[in-house]
Image (cartoon, grey):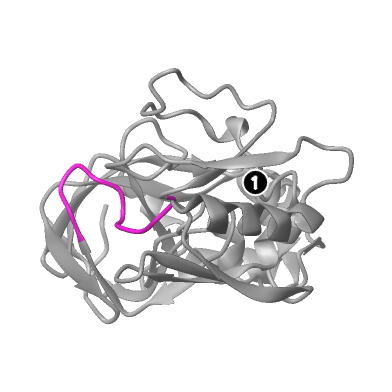
């Protein structure tokens, strides 16, 4: 049963490069059948990544360097400028860098910048992979993620540590409602702003959520906590975008 509690869109994040940088937004326009614009457009391939011959196909997250194996990535924040097609990355242990990921010279500068943050004796970063009309989300279908600050607060209370939402790399964060009620919405259509979405499935979490996004170091075993208190390691849900529309902070969630 869906309660009558008011749920408000509290935070909007996008991540231009998968696992590398998060950006807080006030509003964004979503498009039917697509991923969030500017979200996970690129992913960092390494020298062992099997790039499809077409270079246009979705490939799973295990193909890329990411926060679960390179914890320092989690401390990167980003700014994506669509007009100049540049990304600015900020990390506490690195000088700020601004580059165009589609420019070969700039790409080489980025690869040199990111190397010290990659795992020692691990695969070497070699290119930024993208597939054009959708982001490289963890789902084979184009998706956006929907999460709850109430769920985050309850998990934080059980752990005894205030968890930063950036650990979970979510797109749309709600406030209000009941903790973990989002798992009851599977198959439900919802409206945020002028966009309609459909809740598809829970998000199974990985080791990246163990990393503090301020320090870039593992400090909390979130997966063990989820399994201990809830019997699974899911947090948040994936949604498909059904209609074009703009969402912004303060929008109330409406059930169809």
Looking at the rendering, the stretch of residues picked out in magenta corresponds to: 30-40
Q: Quadrant of the C terminus?
A: bottom left
Compared with 224, 28 (above or below) is below
Residue 213 place in picture, x, y as percent: 68, 68
Compared with 152, 95 (above or below) is below
User: Is 108 left or right of 179, judged from the image as shown?
Assistant: right
User: Is 48 left or right of 244, judged from the image as shown?
Assistant: right
Tell me if mark 1 has few (under 14), some (14-19) or many (20+) residues whose alpha carbon lies within 10 angstroms of its own.
many
Q: Within the magenta stretch, is there residue 190? A: no
Q: Helix or strand or loop: what does disc 1 sit on?
A: loop
User: Is 61 left or right of 218, judged from the image as shown?
Assistant: left
| Residue situated furthest right in the rendering | 121
User: Is 33 left or right of 24, judged from the image as shown?
Assistant: left
Q: Can residue 197 be seen in this view?
A: yes
Q: Nearer the viewer, residue 84 or 122?
A: 84
Which residue appears at 26% of the width and 57% of the height? 2
- Residue occupied by mark 1: 66
Residue 137 place in picture, x, y as percent: 43, 42
Which residue appears at 67% of the width and 71% of the height? 157
Q: Residue 110 appears in which quarter of the rendering?
A: bottom right
Q: Nearer the viewer, residue 88 or 36?
A: 88
Which residue appears at 44% of the width and 17% of the height? 53
């Amino acid at each position: 049963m869906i309660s009558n509690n008011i749920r408000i869109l509290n935070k909007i994040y996008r991540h231009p490069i998968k696992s590398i940088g998060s950006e807080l937004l006030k509003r964004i326009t979503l498009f039917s059948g697509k991923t969030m614009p500017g979200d996970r457009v690129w992913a960092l391939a390494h020298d062992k990544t099997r790039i499809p011959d077409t270079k246009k196909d979705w490939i799973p997250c295990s193909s890329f360097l990411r926060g679960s194996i390179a914890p320092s990535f989690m401390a990167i924040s980003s700014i994506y400028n669509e007009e100049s097609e540049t990304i600015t990355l900020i990390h506490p242990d690195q000088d700020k860098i601004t580059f165009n990921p589609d420019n070969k010279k700039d790409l080489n500068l980025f690869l040199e910048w990111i190397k010290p943050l990659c795992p020692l004796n691990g695969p070497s970063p070699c290119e930024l992979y993208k597939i054009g009309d959708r982001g490289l989300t963890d789902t084979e279908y184009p998706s956006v993620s929907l999460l709850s600050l109430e769920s985050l607060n309850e998990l934080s209370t059980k752990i005894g540590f205030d968890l930063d939402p950036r650990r979970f790399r979510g797109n749309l964060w709600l406030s209000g409602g009941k903790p973990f009620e989002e798992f009851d919405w599977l198959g439900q259509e919802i409206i945020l702003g002028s966009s309609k979405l459909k809740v598809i499935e829970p998000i199974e979490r990985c080791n990246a959520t163990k990393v503090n996004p301020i320090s870039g170091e593992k400090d909390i075993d979130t997966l063990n906590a989820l399994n201990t208190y809830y019997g699974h390691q899911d947090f948040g849900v994936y949604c498909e975008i059904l209609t074009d529309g703009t969402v912004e902070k303060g929008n109330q969630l409406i059930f169809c």
